[in-house]
Amino acid sequence: MKKIFLFIFASFTFIQCASVKSQTASSLTLQKTILETPQTTTLNRPKLVVGIVIDQMRYDYLIKFYSKYGENGFKKLMNDGYNLQNVHYNYIPTYTAVGHTSIYTGTTPTNHGIIGNNWYDKFEKKSIYCVDDISYKTVGANKGGEKSPYRMLTTTITDQLKLAQNMNGKTIGISIKDRSAILTAGHTANAAYWFEGGDTGKFITSTFYMNALPIWVNNFNNSGIANSYLEKIWDTYFDINTYTETIADHNIFEEPFKGKKSPSFPYDLAKLRKSNNNYDLLKAVAYGNDFTTDFAKATILGENLGKSEYTDFLSISYSSTDYVGHQFGVDSKEVEDSYIRLDKNIEDLIIFLDTKVGKANYTLFLTADHAAVQVPSYLKTLKIPGGYFDNQKFKVFANNITQTHFNSSELIEDISNNQLFLNKDKIKELHLDILKVEQVLVDELINFENIYKTVSAYTLQSTTFSTGILQTLQNGYNQKFSGDVLFIPNPTTISYAQVGSTHGSGYSYDTHVPLIFYGQGIKKGTSNEYYPIIDIAPTISSLLKIEQPNGTTGKTITEVLE
């Protein structure tokens, strides 16, 4: 009996030990599993960010044409998104390439290096274009694709999103204009597509991005969509007699298309295309925005944007508004009709995003790369000051100054973008003090008609302007690339033809643009607080919980974020 008891006791003890050992081993295995398995935290990022930039859109177009808009385009963004009513560009010059770059980098030309669409390169001694790059070849056509963003010195929000996701997610830029697609998509983009006009009539790209167009792009190009728009007649969307927000249709302040005597509706595009370089005509009419919307939708479907575990980014730039504005002017029936039709494009895009990506899965912002001046010759008929800057007369005036003071008319190497680039070699050869040459020009050029301010590069480097138009000039000055003497024309004084509108200044008619945030992570609301355009990039960065672009000088607009 005693032996049986000892046997049972030993067996029970063994089972207990084995059980404890087993539990300990299981516990260790569990702990090891916990240590080896990463804990995942889901970031509440949208599946897709859509950045819309409308080329040459003044803020007041939202108000001026409000009664003509439908309920589901601009009005929907304004009413259901966050509408910032006092957003301005805080630098000079307000050009397309500079605007798109500043939006996406969160800084000004001082840091990002894009100081114009074209500018004089004082190292290469020639005028250069912002995205030209002979290191790459055209993809999708015979020309037009030797491009890249290499002149942009800082990162973009699109770059930072790619970096934050270990290069996952897709970034794509699209526009009729090459610079608008390339500079927004950034250095790390999967693709940038732009429209090559002339006899090509296709969206193309560069070997910087790829060696062959995707099948879906080829299918779009071969679909005949571009040609179909040029078989249309461009007439007003509504009865032209209801377009009471703009001046008479036929007036002397607009430039007609080649092959048409008057700048007035309707426009038979099939008859006009041959005289206006074929597919280039599509860029310059309201249907160019329809065409851009078609391609944006094809991009979303072709690339499955907003469908992966990562956040994708699509930048869309509507360029045709700029072409129309330049040709017909701010107060034209053509501009009014273009925005009425663009409102329908925005509605179409929102419905498409809601359906294909999901209402709760995307964030959108809408702004402009610059605004525009009213036609000075028209303003003068209303007794409002304005005029035209005579570049040739100014060149003679400037050379006479250097001849008088320094006995040489060869001291100015180039005059462009309201800047003088001095001939450093000639100044050195004549043993002149460059700072004295700069200052003499500053003191004398102010006497030229229609010049409001003059300033030297040395002053911009050694003085900080905290307010006023000289501050905006300083924000646009880049020590390495900009000129040696800079000047600002009088308000509403432009270097342009006496028909049509343009832009480029630091005055409010060029700087004041719309900015609306909409979608996931965005509050509903309206604000009249002043914000500079460079605040967009840090705001989107905060929304996405990523690092801001590496040159950012803007700040997050916290009031728009949920």
Image: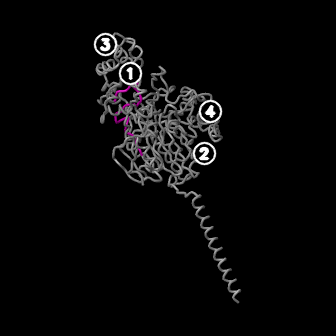
In this rendering, would 357 be left or right of 4?
left
The label shown at residue 420 is: 1
Q: Are marks 4 and 1 in contact (CB under 8 Å)?
A: no
Depth-wise, is mark 4 or mark 1 nearer the camera? 1
Quick one: which residue is furthest to the front in this view?
2
Q: CA distance from mark 4 to mark 1?
A: 37 Å
In this rendering, would 361 be left or right of 95?
right
- Note whether 108 is above or below 402 in the view shown: below
The label shown at residue 139 is: 4
Q: Quadrant of residue 389?
A: top left
The label shown at residue 122 is: none
Give the x, y percent position of residue 220: 62, 40
Give the x, y percent position of residue 63: 38, 44
Q: Give the SS element for disc 3.
A: helix
**Which badge, 2 or 3, is on the more N-terminal residue?**
2
- Identified at 66% across, 77% down, the residue is 15
Q: Give the SS element for disc 2.
A: loop
Depth-wise, is mark 1 or mark 2 nearer the camera? 1
**Which badge, 1 or 2, is on the more N-terminal residue?**
2
Q: CA distance from mark 2 to mark 3?
A: 63 Å
Q: Which residue lies under the disc numbered 3?
A: 405
Q: CA distance from mark 2 to mark 4?
A: 18 Å
Q: Which residues are magenta?
A: 492-515
- Identified at 46% across, 34% down, the residue is 322
Q: Which residue lies under the disc numbered 2?
A: 303
Q: Amino acid at mark 2?
A: Glu
Q: Nearer the viewer, residue 82 or 18?
A: 18
- Note whether 30 is above or below 92 in the view shown: below
Q: CA distance from mark 3 to mark 1?
A: 17 Å
Give the x, y percent position of residue 395: 37, 17
Q: Amino acid at mark 4?
A: Val
Q: Nearer the viewer, residue 271 or 437?
A: 437
